Image (cartoon, rainbow, N blue to C red):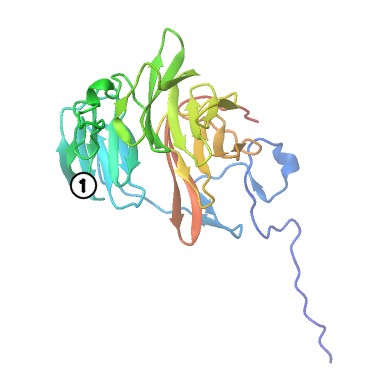
Amino acid sequence: MQSSPTSTIRPMNSISSFKGLNNVSDPLRLGLAWLVQADNVDITDTGALSKRGGYARVLTGAVTGAYSTLKFSRCYLVVGGTLAAFSGSSALTVLRTGLNPAPMHFAEVNDYVYFNNGVDSGVIGPDHSVQPWRDAPLKDALFFDAAGAKLDALFDPLPLGTDVVQHWRGRMYAAQYFSNDAQSAVWFSQPLGYHLFSMDVDFLMVPGRIVMLAPHADALIIGTDSQIHAFDGKTLVQLADYGVVPGQHWSRDDNDRILFWSKRGLCAGLPFANLTDRQVSVPPGVSAGGAIVRHGGQRRYVVSLQQGGTAFNPL
C-alpha cells in the first residue's frame, strides 16, 4: 500500500510574522499581522512576538536631570537638588549640593559635561571634578589678545535664565525663553570659548519656547513647544508645524540621523521625517526620556513618558 506524500497544511488566517503596532487605521481592514494594542511585548526583527524584559528599581528620589556620556562610561543624575555620579547601584557619588529644582540640561564636549538649569551651571571633568561655567572661566579656556591681556572682560558670561544647552560646530548654544514675547533667544558662544558670549550680536530668535537643541552635521535641530526648526549657522528653516516634548530624548543612530520624540511621535533628521505618524498615535506625554538601546542583537529607540498630552490622530 502506497502512502501519499506529506504536505504542509497552513491554517486559514495564519500569521507568519507581525508587522508592528497600528492604532490609526481601521482594524477591520488592517489584516491580522498588525497589532492594535501591544502591551508588555517586543516585536523582533523577524516579526515574532516575545514578552518584554522586566525591570527593577535601583533609586528613588526627585530626579530633575539625567545624562549618560557619549561613550556610556559615566552617568550623572540630579536628585533632590544634588548632582551625583551614578554607577548603576543605589549608591551615588555626590558632586554638588543645593541646586535649584528646575530641570537640568546637559551638553558634552571632549569628555567634559556641561550642565545648566537657568540658575545653576558648571562643567564636570572626566574625573568627576566640577568647575564653574558661568561664575568664572575654565583654566584651559582663557582668551588673550596679541599683547597678552585677558579678553574675558570683553565678553558676557553664560546668560542667566538660559536652560537648554548644546554644543555644535565648536560653539556652545544656550536657549532662553521670553514669555512676554512668546519667543526664545539662542545665544551662542565664541568658537572654542564656551564661557564667552557676546549677547549684543551672537544670537538668533526662534518663535515659541525651546525645549530641545540637537546637533546634526548639517544643522542644529531646534525643537520648540510648537514647531521644529533647523539652523545651519546662517538660516533658520521650519521643518514641522508641531512641537517637541520637553526632556532628554534625542539620540544619534548608526546613520548619523538624530531621533527625537515630538508631539506627534518619533521623528528623525536630517532630512526631517516623522517615522510613526502613519500608524501610531499616542498621548505624547508632558516630558520624555529616550535613547537608542542595543540589546539581544537588535536596535530600538526606547522612550519613557511622563503621562499627559493628547494624541494627535487617534482612531
Q: Residue at x 21, y 28 (%)?
A: 150
**Looking at this view, is 187 or 223 the one in front?**
187
Q: Is residue 106 above or below residue 73?
A: above
Q: Residue at x 18, y 47 (%)?
A: 91
In what quadrant of the picture does the N terminus appear?
bottom right
> Quadrant of residue 145 in the image?
top left
- How far from the left and from the top, in percent, is residue 283? 52, 30
Determine the residue located farthest toward the bottom in the rendered image: 1
Label 1 environment density (alpha carbons within 10 Å; few <14, some 14–19, many ≥20): few
Q: Label 1 belongs to which residue?
A: 90
> Quadrant of residue 289 in the image?
top left
- How far from the left and from the top, in percent, is residue 54? 39, 52
In the figure, is residue 278 to the left or right of 66?
A: right
Determine the residue located farthest toward the front in the rendered image: 147
Q: Secondary structure at mark 1?
A: loop
- How far from the left and from the top, in percent, is residue 158? 29, 24
**Looking at this view, is 221 or 243 the one in front?**
221
For the image, the number of numbered tags is 1
In what quadrant of the picture does the C terminus appear?
top right
In the figure, is residue 58 to the left or right of 177?
A: left
Q: Residue at x 33, y 37 (%)?
A: 192
Q: Can I make out residue 247 in this image?
A: yes
In the figure, is residue 131 to the left or right of 48?
A: left
**Looking at this view, is 6 or 97 the one in front?**
97
**Looking at this view, is 96 or 193 the one in front?**
193
Q: Amino acid at mark 1?
A: Ser
Q: Can I make out residue 307 in this image?
A: no
Determine the residue located farthest toward the top in the rendered image: 180
Q: Is residue 7 above or below residue 173?
A: below
Q: Is residue 11 above or below residue 182?
A: below
In the figure, is residue 68 to the left or right of 242?
A: left
> Quadrant of residue 17 in the image?
bottom right
